[in-house]
Image: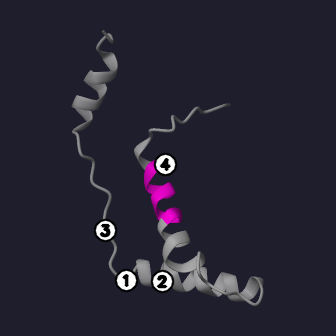
Amino acid sequence: MVHFTPTSASWLNAVEGFFSALSRRRLRRGTFTGIVDLQAAIKRYIAEHNEWPKPFIWTNPAAAILNSQAAPSV
């Protein structure tokens, strides 16, 4: 079974945002002596990020999203 996920999917944007922040805040200017050092830096970032978790909140109610998809585009 093939499942198509549009690039505008909210969860996909959240994942991309997380990896972008990881890259900018921890990896871009870091110096790593090996894979183990890189893995440790990633694990530290995840642990720090999870200290203050923020739930994902939909900006539109489900009915509004579904209605916008059902309406014919002009």
| Distance of label 2 from label 4 (alpha carbons) | 21 Å
Check disc 4 and report the residue beneath it.
12
> Percent position (x, y) of residue 70?
32, 16
Tell me which numbered mark, 4 or 3, is placed earlier along the sequence: 4
When the figure is inspected, residue 15 is found, relative to residue 62, above or below; the finding is below
Residue 16 coordinates in the image, percent (x, y):
51, 55
Q: Of marks 2 and 4, which one's residue comes earlier in the chain?
A: 4
Q: Which residue is mark 3?
A: 54
Residue at image mark 1: 51
Q: CA distance from mark 2 to mark 1?
A: 6 Å
Residue ID at (27%, 54%): 57
The residue carrying pointer 1 sits among few (fewer than 14), some (14 to 19) or many (20 or more) residues within 10 Å by Cα, namely few
As drawn, 16 above or below 40: above
**CB under 8 Å between discs 1 and 4:** no
Residue name at image x 76 percent, y 82 percent: 35
Locate the C terminus by quadrant: top left
- Which region shows up in magenta? 13-20
